[in-house]
């Protein structure tokens, strides 16, 4: 084991014998592997027969991607799981797999007796109440144990203030990881990780610090680097829409260029107070179709859109785009597969982080015609009041186009995944 693990990984694996064991720190720092090995060893050798062990994460997909797929790689003969299932079989024992995206998730563990728990990205748990309920479900088990990992967040986050900072008093074991603790990372990997994270993201994701997100959200946005007047030939297109409930609707046309850069090529916006009227969903769909026609005429190219992504909270707009065939009977096909944007706790921050990282590595450009988006990116700011409550939230003002851009970028994961290390998580 010592040949493939770093000293910090070995230390945490061997020392994970407290009631609660926590690995926190930078992304790609090796903390997940060490924690999974410790959890698997406990399930195989020491876990009580009372109750049912659990694996908890933000969603079933993230649990599979971050945890169970790694467990299968480590011991394929003893870890059986069907993707999206709520039960895994590990060392012959049934283990419940639970997604916890919001406060309603607490009901999923009420009444359970839990001898062992693995928590992926604990800072994305709904609240302190869920964490406490999880530990309460273990209280009657004599040899109970919890294993939890997380990347850093706001220093006022409940998991930092009420859990990590109280670890000594609570007799928890805690380990802090940085990229040098992962023996798999090369010097090039570490340099790439540092390059794609700027500002608050560098301090959190590379240094592993719990720091406040304050000031401009996109402080790395440089008009000289990121605004362009010319567009290259595009390999694929998508449309992203933020249908605002207050009467402001926004959309962006995003393309993957043959220069291996993502380009926001055009924008559309409808502000009800300026136009003196609101739009129905049917009218929004018609305006979008006309706007895309105009984009084709303006740029002199055909725009075959493979997907349209919409704020998932606006279910009526999603349904309308699926149903509407447009005046020429080709709306649905032309706008590709309609999908709801990522949702759940952390999705906004994760999307912002992806956009900021693409800016940092020069893989995202905005066409100069997108004046509204450019203005929003120059002023989009973190909410200082939310920061003091332990939350990362942007100010909800002049943000429709940056929201649409974020939906589109996250939808285009296949485009940017090869360029960014460690960002394909939630």
Image: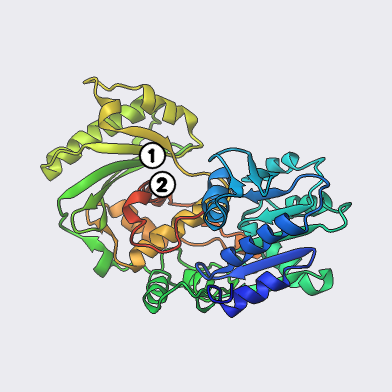
Q: Which mark is residue 354?
A: none
- The part of the image, by quadrant, that contains residue 151 is bottom right
Label 1: element kind? strand
Counting from the top left corner in percent of width and height, residue 157 is at 66, 63
C-beta proximity under 8 Å, tags 2 and 1: yes
Q: Position of residue 49 (x, y in %)?
A: 81, 48
- Work out whether 274 lies above or below 27: above
* In this picture, residue 135 sits left or right of residue 292: right
Is any part of residue 305 visible from this angle? yes
Lower position in the chain sequence, tag 2 or tag 1: 1
How packed is label 2: few (under 14 Cα within 10 Å), some, or many (20 or more)? many
Image coordinates for residue 123, horizontal then vertical, percent: 63, 59
Q: Position of residue 172 (x, y in %)?
A: 77, 69
Q: Which of the pair 380/45 is nearer the observer?
A: 45
* Residue 390 seen in the current view: no
Q: Which residue is mark 2?
A: 407
Under circle 2, the secondary element is: helix
Category of crowding for the residue at label 1, using alpha-carbon neighbours closer than 10 angstroms: few (below 14), some (14–19), many (at least 20): many
In the foreground, 86 or 170: 86
| Residue 309 badge | 1
To which quarter of the image does residue 150 belong?
A: bottom right
- The N terminus appears in which quarter of the rendering? bottom right
User: Marks 2/1: CA distance?
Assistant: 7 Å
Residue sitting at 37 percent across and 28 percent down? 321
- Name the one closer to the observer, 283 or 60: 60
Say left or right for 420 vs 63: left
């Amino acid at each position: 084991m010592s040949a493939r693990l770093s000293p910090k990984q070995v230390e945490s694996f061997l020392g994970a014998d407290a009631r609660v064991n926590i690995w926190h720190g930078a992304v790609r720092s090796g903390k997940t592997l060490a924690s999974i090995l410790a959890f698997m060893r406990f399930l195989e050798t020491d876990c009580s027969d009372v109750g049912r062990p659990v694996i908890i994460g933000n969603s079933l997909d993230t649990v599979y991607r971050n945890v169970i797929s790694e467990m299968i790689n480590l011991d394929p003969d003893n870890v059986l799981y069907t993707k999206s299932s709520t039960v895994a079989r590990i060392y012959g024992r049934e283990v419940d797999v639970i997604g916890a995206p919001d406060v309603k998730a607490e009901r999923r563990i009420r009444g359970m007796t839990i001898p062992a728990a693995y928590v992926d990205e604990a800072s994305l748990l709904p609240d302190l109440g869920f964490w406490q309920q999880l530990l309460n479900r273990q209280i009657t088990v004599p040899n109970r144990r919890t294993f939890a990992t997380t990347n850093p967040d706001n220093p006022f986050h409940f998991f930092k203030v009420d859990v990590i900072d109280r670890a000594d008093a609570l007799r928890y074991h805690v380990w802090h990881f940085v990229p040098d603790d992962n023996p798999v990372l090369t010097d090039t990997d570490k340099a790439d990780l540092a390059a794609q994270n700027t500002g608050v993201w560098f301090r959190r994701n590379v240094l592993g610090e719990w720091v406040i997100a304050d000031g401009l959200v996109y402080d790395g946005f440089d008009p000289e680097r990121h605004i362009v007047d010319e567009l290259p030939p595009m390999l694929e297109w998508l449309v992203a829409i933020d249908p605002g409930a207050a009467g402001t609707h926004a959309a962006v046309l995003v393309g993957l260029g043959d220069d291996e850069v993502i380009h926001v090529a055009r924008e559309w916006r409808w502000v009800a107070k300026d136009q003196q009227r609101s739009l129905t969903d049917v009218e929004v769909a018609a305006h979008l179709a006309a706007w895309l026609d105009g984009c084709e005429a303006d740029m002199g190219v055909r725009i075959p859109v493979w997907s349209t992504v919409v704020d998932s909270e606006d279910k009526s707009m999603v349904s309308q785009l699926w149903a509407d065939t447009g005046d020429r009977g080709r709306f649905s096909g032309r706008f590709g597969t309609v999908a709801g944007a990522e949702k759940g706790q952390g999705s906004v921050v994760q999307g912002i982080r992806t956009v900021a990282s693409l800016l940092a590595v020069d893989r995202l450009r905005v066409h100069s015609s997108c004046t509204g988006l450019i203005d929003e990116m120059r002023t989009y700011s973190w909410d200082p009041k939310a920061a003091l409550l332990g939350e990362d939230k942007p100010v909800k003002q002049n943000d429709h186009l940056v929201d649409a851009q974020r939906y589109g970028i996250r939808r285009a994961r296949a485009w940017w995944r090869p360029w960014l290390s460690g960002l394909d998580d939630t």
